[in-house]
Amino acid sequence: MRKVGSILASLYGTEFKRPQTIAEYFCEGCQNHVKVQLLPILGGANKGQLQEFKIGCKCPDKALALEIEEDVERLKKQRYFRYFDQNSLMNNDIKDATFENYKPTTSLQEDVKEFCMLYAEKFTLDAGQLPKNLLLHGDTGIGKTHLAIAILKVVLKKQYSGLFISLPILLTMIKNTYSKHDDSGLTVVDILKKMKDIDLLVIDDLGAEAGSNHDIQKIFELLDSRLGKPTIFTTNLNYNEFSETFGKRNTSRILKNTIITKVDGEDYRKKDVNLEEWL
């Protein structure tokens, strides 16, 4: 392999001056031995003029690699948010929900907001740190759905996948798959499979339209398939209403490894499976 100096000499002939090393040092950035040499510019208006070049320094390469890595991470975030927007079954008026634009009207709602922010901040699927499920319950219009979406958006920024499902819309989609007029080409299996492997699934308005026993069975088949993955539920039903709607067995399955959080009420506490808080 020919050295740089001999190649330049063949290009410039007698006018070429051998590279001159004017400094040497150890680069703390790339951990390489670097020579600073005077070399002629190969082309352009300044062709032949001497310029300093750092030979052996890999810092520009590392900077480029870091820039590429950041671009990849940015594309990942965009992809997750795009998937969220395209596939989440929600009404358009709640898609912009964040912690920043959730405005508590009581000190109780402020406490719930802080707890949900902490849940989102601590969310990780690292080994041994699997998040619990979360059930937000309370009256209509107090921000359960808003807080659930806000949690999901924070999780998406951590490069996890997430999906929001409004249960009434989901049940409509399931029913449509049995109709001969449905042209989506989707089956129940297709719909539920898409939700099985999502890192964080939000099921909103659980119990609003419970549907037939068949519909309920499909929902709980989905939950069983997600064992080991966290799910957030919201519901307007209290414990007795929920148990009557879905049955004690299914209710027990939802309670397993679930933090029950009351969004309104006088005795809000953050407890794991605290049934007294859900009556």
Image (tube, grey):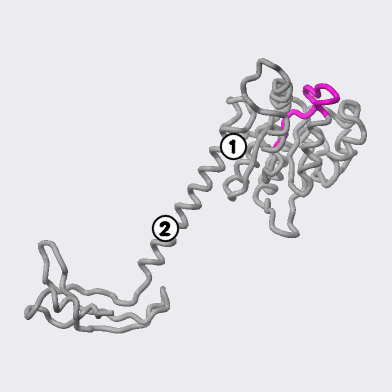
| Cα gap from disc 2 to disc 1, whole angstroms | 26 Å
What is the x, y in percent for residue 237? 82, 27
Q: Is residue 50 above or below residue 259?
A: below
Residue 52 percent across, percent down from the top left: 21, 74
Is residue 175 magenta-colored? no
Residue 240 to residue 153: above or below = above
For disc 1, the neighbor class at 10 Å (few under 14, some 14 to 19, many from 20) is: some
Q: Where are the magenta residues, as a range?
A: 202-216
The amino acid type of the residue labelled 2 equals Glu
**Circle 2: element type:** helix
Residue reaching furthest to the left:
14
Q: Which residue is mark 2?
A: 67
Which residue is found at the position 66% from the left and 47% from the top?
A: 120
The residue at which mark 1 appears reads as 84
Which quadrant: the C terminus?
top right
Question: Residue 200: where, in percent of width, then height?
Answer: 68, 43
Q: Residues within 10 Å of mark 2 (few under 14, many from 20)?
A: few
Residue 33 in the image: state x and y as whole percent: 36, 82
